Image: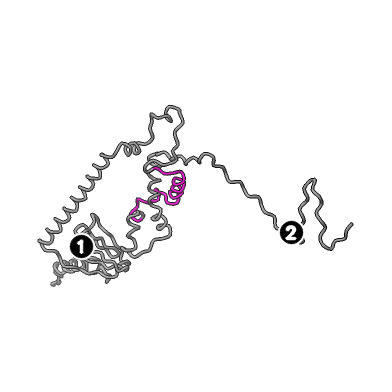
């Protein structure tokens, strides 16, 4: 008796047909269906803002673009959720000449950024002694260190906070604590909040808007607290200035005729009103 055997290659073909090609995106009919890793794409967000970059990773619900090779691009990547994307356009690949030009442009941009940082560092090193003293903090050999009374000028040093600013800044730090990511987390930095709406079309919350509006004072207060910088004393009042006396409460007028004022001592009595009987 002969038993028909199923060829092994048939089973192998079935298994291979079930495998997804390497680098393919999930085929779920979404906006990323035809996108593959390495493609250069242009995303049109629901805010109608375009974003162009090279696909570094693509999933069913998110796409990550490499922005380093775009004109005026940034050194980083951008991940965009699927529900923020209106449409996706796969663009033509660069040829060798265009790729070399963009590589040169990126290297030049990085070189310019490095030179700018070097100039800024040189400027700090060549700053005047007054600026250096303000960065070093209070004088440890002055009258205050030897037990004398410090001189209160009423004006903060360069970058120092007044007591009023410090009070407001501490309240901001309590409302937006750094330990909860304010100022450091990727979705809570001032740079991200400034571009949040143009990039993803999401408006700022009331808390995010308040943090952005007061970011400068929040950051200065945070730096002052971390460095232990002194707080400037309030300006003294000018000599001869007195407090404004409190105004006495004014009584409401009573109904009826106004009473006549009492005569002064030694003065004759006032004449009687017209029509009054003479005694």
Judge left or right: residue 145 versus residue 88: right
The boundaries of the magenta stretch are 160-187
Q: Secondary structure at mark 1?
A: loop
The disc at residue 254 is 2
Write down the quadrant of residue 43 in the picture: bottom left
Q: How is the image coloured?
A: one colour
Q: Position of residue 71 (x, y in %)?
A: 20, 60
Taking the spot 70% from the left edge, 57% from the top edge, the residue there is 252
Q: Position of residue 143 (x, y in %)?
A: 42, 29
Mark 2 Cα within 10 Å, few/some/many (few <14, many 20+)?
Answer: few
Query: Is residue 57 shown above or below 116?
Result: below
Taking the spot 62% from the left edge, 48% from the top edge, the residue there is 246
Write down the quadrant of residue 90 in the picture: bottom left
Near-viewer residue (65 or 260): 260
Q: Secondary structure at mark 2?
A: loop
Residue at image mark 1: 37
Judge left or right: residue 170 versus residue 85: right
Write down the quadrant of residue 207 in the picture: bottom left
Mark 1 Cα within 10 Å, few/some/many (few <14, many 20+)?
Answer: some
The image quadrant where one finds the C terminus is bottom right
Taking the spot 35% from the left edge, 38% from the top edge, the residue there is 134
Near-viewer residue (87 or 62): 87
């Amino acid at each position: 008796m002969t038993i028909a055997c199923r060829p092994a290659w048939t089973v192998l073909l079935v298994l291979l047909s079930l495998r997804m090609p390497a680098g393919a995106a999930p085929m779920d009919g979404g906006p990323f269906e035809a996108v593959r890793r390495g493609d250069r794409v242009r995303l049109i967000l629901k805010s109608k803002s375009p974003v162009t970059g090279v696909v570094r990773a693509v999933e069913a619900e998110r796409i990550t673009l490499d922005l380093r090779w775009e004109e005026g691009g940034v050194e980083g990547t951008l991940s965009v959720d699927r529900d923020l994307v209106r449409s996706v356009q796969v663009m033509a690949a660069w040829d060798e000449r265009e790729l070399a030009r963009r590589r040169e442009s990126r290297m030049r941009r990085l070189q310019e950024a490095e030179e700018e940082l070097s100039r800024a560092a040189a400027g700090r090193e060549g700053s005047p002694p007054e600026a250096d003293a303000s960065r070093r903090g209070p004088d440890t050999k002055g009258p205050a260190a030897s037990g004398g009374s410090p001189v209160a000028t009423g004006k903060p040093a360069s970058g120092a906070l007044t007591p009023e600013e410090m009070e407001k800044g501490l309240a901001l730090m309590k409302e937006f604590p750094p330990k909860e990511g304010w100022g450091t987390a990727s979705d809570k930095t001032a740079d991200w909040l400034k571009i949040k709406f143009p990039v993803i079309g999401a408006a700022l919350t009331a808390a995010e808007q308040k943090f952005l509006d007061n970011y400068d004072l929040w950051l200065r207060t945070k730096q002052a607290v971390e460095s232990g910088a002194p707080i400037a004393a309030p300006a003294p009042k000018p000599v001869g200035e007195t407090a404004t006396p409190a105004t006495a409460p004014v009584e409401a007028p009573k109904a009826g005729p106004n009473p006549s004022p009492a005569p002064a001592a030694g003065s004759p009595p006032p004449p009687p009103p017209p029509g009054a009987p003479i005694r």
